[in-house]
Amino acid sequence: MTRLLDQAVATVAQLPDERQDALARVLLQLAGQEQPPYILTPEEEADLDSSAAAEAQGEFATDDEIRAIRTKHGR
């Protein structure tokens, strides 16, 4: 194992189990191992549904509005 990969594994090992599993899935997928689809929790599904409803009602800022905010605040 390379030093960088060893450092990454040591860093990830200190994270909560759920975060470790999420990062492990990404790493395995990048290495060419297909992973089963992620199953949303009921709370995640509700959040996604709420976000989709907000988008459908036009509640998100437009690109122009975001650019104006960034310009105003120097970003």
Image (spheres, helix red, strand yellow):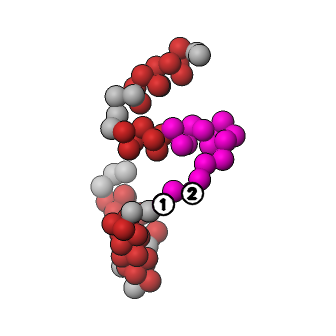
Up-down relation of residue 55 to residue 39 (above or below) = below
* Relative depth, front residue between 68 and 4: 4
Q: Residue furthest bottom?
A: 57
For residue 50, say whether it is visible.
yes
Q: Residues within 10 Å of mark 2 (few under 14, many from 20)?
A: few
Question: Element under label 2?
Answer: loop
How many residues crowd mark 1 within 10 Å: few (<14), some (14–19), many (20+)? few
Amino acid type assigned to the residue bearing label 2 in the image: Pro
For the N terminus, give its image quadrant: top right
Instruction: Inspect the image, locate mark 1, and give the three-letter code of the amino acid beneath it.
Output: Ile
Q: Residue visible at 47% across and 25% down?
A: 8
Residue farthest right in this picture: 32
Q: Is residue 55 above or below residue 1?
A: below
Q: Which mark is residue 47?
A: none
Q: Residue at x 69, y 40 (%)?
A: 32
Q: What is the number of the mark on residue 39? A: 1
Nearest the viewer among 52 and 26 is 26
Magenta residues, as a range?
24-39
Q: Nearer the viewer, residue 53 or 30?
A: 30
Q: Nearer the viewer, residue 2 or 28?
A: 28
Q: Which mark is residue 37?
A: 2
User: Is residue 46 shown left or right of residue 28?
Assistant: left
Q: Is residue 13 above or below residue 51?
A: above
Residue 26: in magenta span:
yes
Q: Residue at x 34, y 51 (%)?
A: 74
Q: Is residue 73 left or right of residue 12?
A: left
Image spot of residue 31 (x, y percent): 66, 36
**Are the two marked residues, 1 and 2, in contact with CB atoms closer than 8 angstroms?**
yes
Q: Secondary structure at mark 1?
A: loop
Which quadrant of the structure image shows residue 11? Answer: top left
Residue 18 pos. (x, y %):
38, 44
